[in-house]
Image (spheres, rainbow, N blue to C red):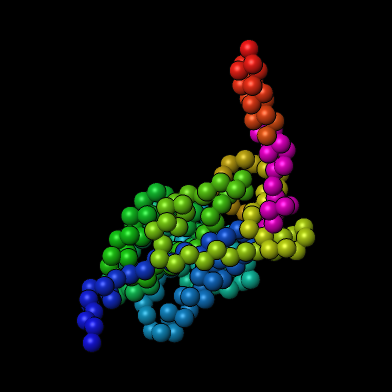
Amino acid sequence: MVGYNMGHLASGTVEVVCGPMFSGKTEELIRRVRRAQIARQKVQIFKPTIDDRYHKSDVVSHSSLSVEAQPVTSSTEILANLYDSTRVVAIDEIQFFDEKIIPVIKKLARRGIRVICAGLDQDYKGSSFGPLPELLCMADRVDKIQAICTVCGAPASKTYRRNAEEMSDQVLVGESDHYEARCRGHWDDHEEDEDLLAFSHSLQSGETSHVSE
């Protein structure tokens, strides 16, 4: 019989649920939390204080599922408020946390805790959001889920911001009043792509002329 390292069995895991807005990330986080609670595991849920759209303390999904949580203003508050008996830590809206969230999550996993994170992997411009790039690299499991495009009904992997010219900050907490889920075809900024392509052709033409001379 093969022997097992008990330290390995006790090691924690890091799970990430990501995708655009309205894709059900928080709903999936709540589902996993409830399954852990049914298994009688001690669970603690944290959320950033900036996210008070539905409730100041509870984590609430767009479909109105909710679970009691603790709002925190910084990543280190998670460690400060952790109970010794906790076996599962769930963190919603992970993109809003500061850069210290990565070492905090690593420390939790080293303690043998299962860490479940949910958040946006991209902002409305399609750029990486907060600590997500590093978090996705270190995670043991990543589930990237899709929403439904509000224009054509196709699977949506992008978040579109209305009036983006007027509200250009990366962080703007809001719901359907500010955001829509879009497929790539109905989200892409084609004009920007064409400008870049034209610039590239211009550079190539200049290099060719220089060689001819």
Where residue 121 sits: x, y (%)? 53, 55
Q: Quadrant of the C terminus?
A: top right
Q: Residue 72 vs residue 165: left or right?
A: left
Q: Quadrant of the N terminus?
A: bottom left
Q: What residue is at 56 percent from the left and 52 percent from the top?
A: 122
Query: Furthest residue to the right?
Result: 152
Judging depth in this view, the residue of 35 and 141 nearest the camera is: 141
As drawn, 195 above or below 59: above
Where residue 118 sits: x, y (%)? 50, 63
Quadrant of the rendered structure where residue 195 is? top right
Numbered marks: total: 0
Query: Furthest residue to the front?
Result: 212
Where residue 145 sits: x, y (%)? 58, 65
Query: Furthest residue to the bottom?
Result: 1
Judging depth in this view, the residue of 176 and 193 nearest the camera is: 193
Q: Is residue 193 magenta?
A: yes
Q: Residue 61 vs residue 6: left or right?
A: right
Q: Residue 4 vs residue 94: left or right?
A: left
Region rendered in magenta = 178-196
Can residue 186 be seen in the rendering of this structure?
A: yes
Where residue 198 sits: x, y (%)? 70, 30
Judging depth in this view, the residue of 211 and 90 nearest the camera is: 211
Quadrant of the rendered structure where residue 109 is? bottom left
Q: What residue is at 36 percent from the left and 51 percent from the top?
A: 100
As drawn, 64 above or below 51: below
As drawn, 156 above or below 209: below
Can residue 199 be seen in the rendering of this structure?
A: no
Q: What residue is at 28 percent from the left and 76 percent from the top?
A: 9
Q: What residue is at 64 percent from the left and 54 percent from the top?
A: 159
